[in-house]
Image: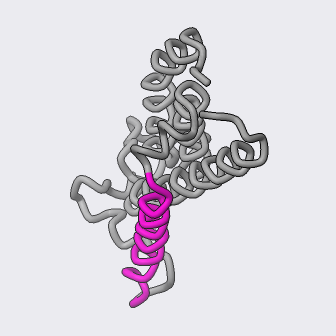
Amino acid sequence: MSESKIIKTISSIAFPFVMIYGLYVILHGHLTPGGGFQGGAIVASACVLLLAGYGSREIAKRIKEGQLSVLESIGALGFVSLALLGISTTFFYNFLAGSHSIFGRIPPFGSNPGDLNTAGLLPLMNISVGIKVIAGLFAIVMVLAFVTWKMGGRKQ
């Protein structure tokens, strides 16, 4: 069964915009409402757009479930590793905050002009969580798409 040309076109057009917005939410989660989980869910939704537009068989040719499992493990390992790096002080110690590097410095007490780069480890943790959520949610949706396809007997 060939997919609708309208659905393919709209999903192809919307995919980069939804993907960019999801990555924005992940990377700015320490400054605005959002973070790794919310942004990861948005990016996974962008991938589901392609799944809806091109069908599960076409997407499965390009993305394997094993690759998603490895990506999810990398996200979990990155998150736990970042948490353990500060274990000399406490678990999840934000040792990068205040290091006067690209990871931010501690803002002065009282009113300040608005230092936005003061998060330290938080953006890295958001990225790790985002990777895990993207891979996990998209793997779940792919499995559900295959189960539906096999039970329905449709050609996709």
Is 55 positioned to the left or the right of 126 in the image?
Answer: right
Q: Residue furthest right?
A: 152
Q: Which residues are magenta?
A: 64-88
Residue 73 x/y as whole percent: 46, 70
Determine the residue positioned at 37% across, 60% down. Answer: 120
Front residue of this view, candidates 75 and 30: 75
Residue 4 x/y as whole percent: 60, 14
Q: Residue furthest bottom?
A: 88
Q: Quadrant of residue 86?
A: bottom left
Q: Residue furthest left?
A: 101
Determine the residue positioned at 51% across, 36% down. Answer: 22
Residue 147 x/y as whole percent: 71, 51
Q: Quadrant of the C terminus?
A: top right
Query: Is the residue 139 above or below the residue 18 in the image?
Result: below
Front residue of this view, candidates 128 and 73: 73
Is 31 positioned to the left or the right of 7 in the image?
Answer: left
Q: Quadrant of the N terminus?
A: top right
Determine the residue positioned at 49% across, 85% down. Answer: 90
